[in-house]
Amino acid sequence: MSRQLSPAPDTDDVVLDDLDARPGSATSLLRTVVGLYLRDLGGWVAVADLVALLDAVGVPSAGARSAVSRVKARGLLLADDVGGRPGYRLAPGADAMLARGDRRIFAYRQQADDDAWLLVSFSVPEDRRAARHQLRRHLGGIGCGTVADALWICPAHLSGEVEQILDHLDLRDAATLFVTGTPQTHGTFADAAARWWDLDRIAALHGTFLAAHGDAPRRPGPDDAGSSGSTLSPREAFARWVRAVDDWRPVPYVDPGLPPSALSADWPGTASTALFGALRAALAGPASEHVRAVTRESPGRHGRP
């Protein structure tokens, strides 16, 4: 089997960065397809198959190739010819980022009122202000709230991700982490949460997802005889599912899953989380059928455990 693997670019940013592209763009849709399916294909996909998959979600061939170039530059994919077929392989280090994304996207977790919190206190000297800027950006990117300029808060179950950020930026010695119960604040915790997190922005993301996918056709089940829902082909289900994941993907990164006591009774996150679960149940299976049909001859295929 002939094989030619291009040199790996610097993959430092792959460890942490996941959401640079605008949802719905060719680059973001490619990133979503890669995250959903490339590991199940053995980490490799033929160029022609990837272009065909992106065509199903409305990305033309020229746009697909431009998006691939951008994703390669970010260190997510490497050019790799297998069996004489040009293709792309996941870059070293990408698996960990994708697995972390899986946990966020498919295992969204809402805090209970008595769950623990993590406080992140840091002091970064002025000669490392670039690293300080990156620390703030990454903490915000995993849903941390800002109590004060150098004091941030997030659910305690995100402590592993905070540690990874600090280690990646070589700032572990500049930070102290405290695991605590619900902070005692002036006024209600809901009042404090509204100061620490941009709840209007988070609510808007949930509302946008509901508006975009609330009327999406669902694939009827065996008990849905006479249902008015549209029966989707595997290709249509694939397109719907990829776009749903692509639109949902940023939400659980900026929404830390605040407890009910911090949210209004009409918080849109409850409905959008339920909608995403319903779309997954209806569309993920037939979407995978489409991927299997398109990539049937791919030499790198094998099932992911």
Image (spheres, rainbow, N blue to C red):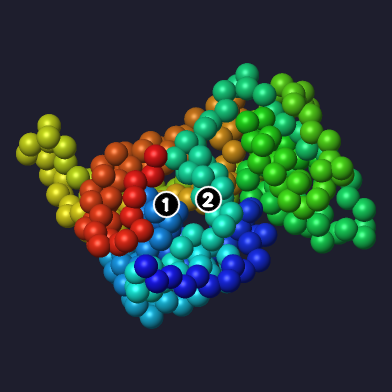
Q: Does dot 2 land on a helix, a strand or a loop? A: helix
User: Which of 273/31 is in front?
Assistant: 31
User: Which of 178/52 is in front?
Assistant: 52
Locate residue 260, reporting x and y percent.
Answer: 55, 27
Locate residue 193, reporting x and y percent.
Answer: 67, 35
Q: Which residue is located at x 76 percent, y 46 percent?
A: 166
Identify the mark nearer the N-term, 1 or 2: 1
The answer to whether residue 267 is above or below residue 96 is: above
Residue 22 seen in render: no
Where is mark 2, residue-wise? 95
Q: Which residue is located at x 79 percent, y 29 percent?
A: 178
Quarter of the image for the C terminus: give it.
Answer: top left
Where is mark 1, residue-wise? 39
Q: Residues within 10 Å of mark 1 (few under 14, many from 20)?
A: many
Locate residue 27, reporting x and y percent.
Answer: 47, 68
Q: CA distance from mark 1 to mark 2?
A: 8 Å
Residue 34 seen in render: yes
Q: Which residue is located at x 28 percent, y 56 percent?
A: 291
Contact between marks 1 and 2 (CB within 8 A): the answer is yes
Quarter of the image where one finds residue 57: bottom left
- The type of residue carrying mark 1 is Arg
Q: Residue furthest front?
A: 1
For residue 218, the mark is none
Locate residue 141, reporting x and y percent.
Answer: 64, 50
- The type of residue carrying mark 2 is Asp
Q: Does dot 1 land on a helix, a strand or a loop? A: loop
